[in-house]
Image: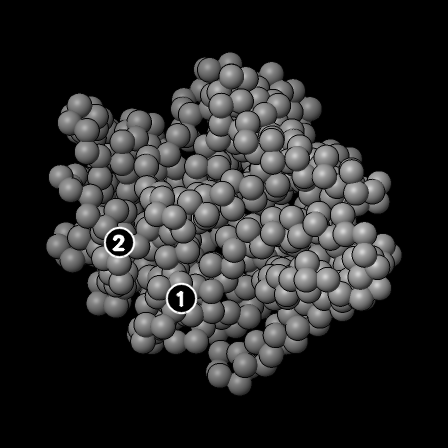
Amino acid sequence: MTARPLLCRRLVYLGLVLLLAALPLVLLWRALAEGGWTVAEATVLALAALIAPWVANLGASAIIGFTVLVRAGDPLRTVWPEANLAEDAAIAIDTALVLCIRSEDTSAVLARQRRLLGDLAARGLAGRFALAVLSDTQDPAHAANEERAIEAFRATLPEGFRLLYRRRDFNDGFKAGNVMEFVRNRADGFEAMIVLDADSVMTAECVLRLVRLLQANPRVALIQTLIVARPAVSPFPRLFQFGMRHGMRTYAAGIAWWQGPDGPYWGHNAIIRINAFRDHAVLPTLPSGARILSHDQVEAALLRGAGWEVRLDPLEQGSYEENPPTLPDFLARDLRWMAGNLQYVALLRLPLFHFMGRLQLLLAILLFLFAPVVCAIAALALVNAHDAAPEGAVSAAHGVAATASFAVLFFAPKLLGALEVALRPAGLRAWGGGARFALSVVVEFVFYLVLLPVSATNQTAAMAGLAFGRRIGWAPQSRLDRAVPLADAMRALWWHTLIGTGLLVGFAAASTSALLWALPFVAGAVCAIPFSFATADPRLGRLLVRRGICAVPEEFDSASPFPPLAQRQSGQAVRAA
């Protein structure tokens, strides 16, 4: 795409953002101006103006993505018109499947790749691919088990398939450092690599599509796939990923349309041109001397700053991951991501990026600044609700309209994603039918309304801790389905409950209307403990699976790369695809 059409796309996007951001801000102004202004009201408006562009970005990208998806034709051709892709082109480059692990159940991790390797070998492509396992495991006993699992898996590889294994004694630079060490010292003979996390699953069709796209588009350094979650039995990931699944479809198509060659990198399930990555994606050191935790968006911005294209393929095409199995695991991962994204503040002025690279980093920062800003708005609204002076009056009609406008924009990817599915009869059948899909949308929406205040409270407290010197590390993730005993939930979430209860009592003491306004946004924190317990209860998981509630299309597809969930529930299936 030439510069002019891309500029036109971005002007359309910018116009939508400005329009969508202005609407709730004007309504909020009208609401708060009733009777005059207080310091609390003026601060609320200023904070709302700070996050309005980010929320409007969600709405604008979702609207654009919805338009892309409902149009006839290939979404990839719509977002990337000049892409060269021959579906049957010969594979002409050698690709390393780079699997990054750290203190994992190695046998289960490798088993997830067995079907992919077998399918590639069945196509006569074993010589074009190799599995490179890059380990950062530090514990000696775990490392010994890891090496045994590697050798056992090597003995079962399809003929001609290579397995490379290297474990570092020091995990300098975390996962990004491990990958860069491989690229610099061990990638001879490979032109491309597909980076996989320990929970990644990709189909052979998806891998071959990526290779063909990369080899046919020589200006492209990285192509990110749309990653979706694999079917889950545990209630928390099952409910969480249902909304993410159809919500990410519209959002990803939208950002692929307006970002074009300045696309995102999400750290895995992406193909990368090795020479470009080796030469231009070396992470800078932070001014504090610390290493960058969230490496992916920085690497994408570095590649683009060096003149390479970074693209997002918005199609669902066999690219999967797993989500955390419980609420506490989700909150822990959330804080790791938050700590990594906030490091980007120190990078914005570096000369290594151009404007779009800095915008990508800024959007990643705003993703987590949203939580403390919303919490501050809630606290200031409580102060204002108890202000008996005439200036503290608020227009209820305009206040509700402003709140609803912000909420619609925030939930626009999910809402438009669900509408996009509903408009296609084949799509509804793939999701288990209209009635089941509609019920699932409602159930997931309630789940997310409860989750949001818990997550926002957790992020806000952690961000305050970072300001006072707290450090958040990058520990191995928990991936096994498990229950959360009530006592554990109470120990982890008592203070979330206390804060939520205090806010609700405060709003109730102010007025009934204030309580009703706050209830949808605060009640979730009050319910944090039973919510954590219930969403890890295997009985609820069995009920959801049996009823097909919040099921993803793979659960209704006999050709799915995953074992039936009924087998996983009974413990008879293998632990990985």
Rendered residue at 80%/66% (across/down): 36
Q: Quadrant of residue 211?
A: bottom left
Crowding at label 1, few (<14), some or many (≥20) Cα neighbours within 10 Å? Answer: many
Whether residue 87 is visible? no
The furthest residue to the bottom: 4
Which dot, 2 or 1, sits closer to the camera?
2
- In the image, what residue occupies the spot 60% across and 31% down? 498
Q: Secondary structure at mark 1?
A: strand
Amino acid on which disc 2 is placed? Arg
**Which label belongs to residue 520?**
none
| Label located before the other in sequence (2 or 1) | 2
Percent across and percent down for residue 433 are: 73, 36
Q: Are marks 2 and 1 in contact (CB under 8 Å)?
A: no
Residue closest to the eye, 512 or 314: 512
Q: Is residue 224 left or right of residue 566?
A: left
Q: Amino acid at mark 1?
A: Val
- What secondary structure is found at the residue carrying circle 2? loop
* Residue position marked by numbered label 2 in the rendering: 291
Q: Which mark is residue 310?
A: 1
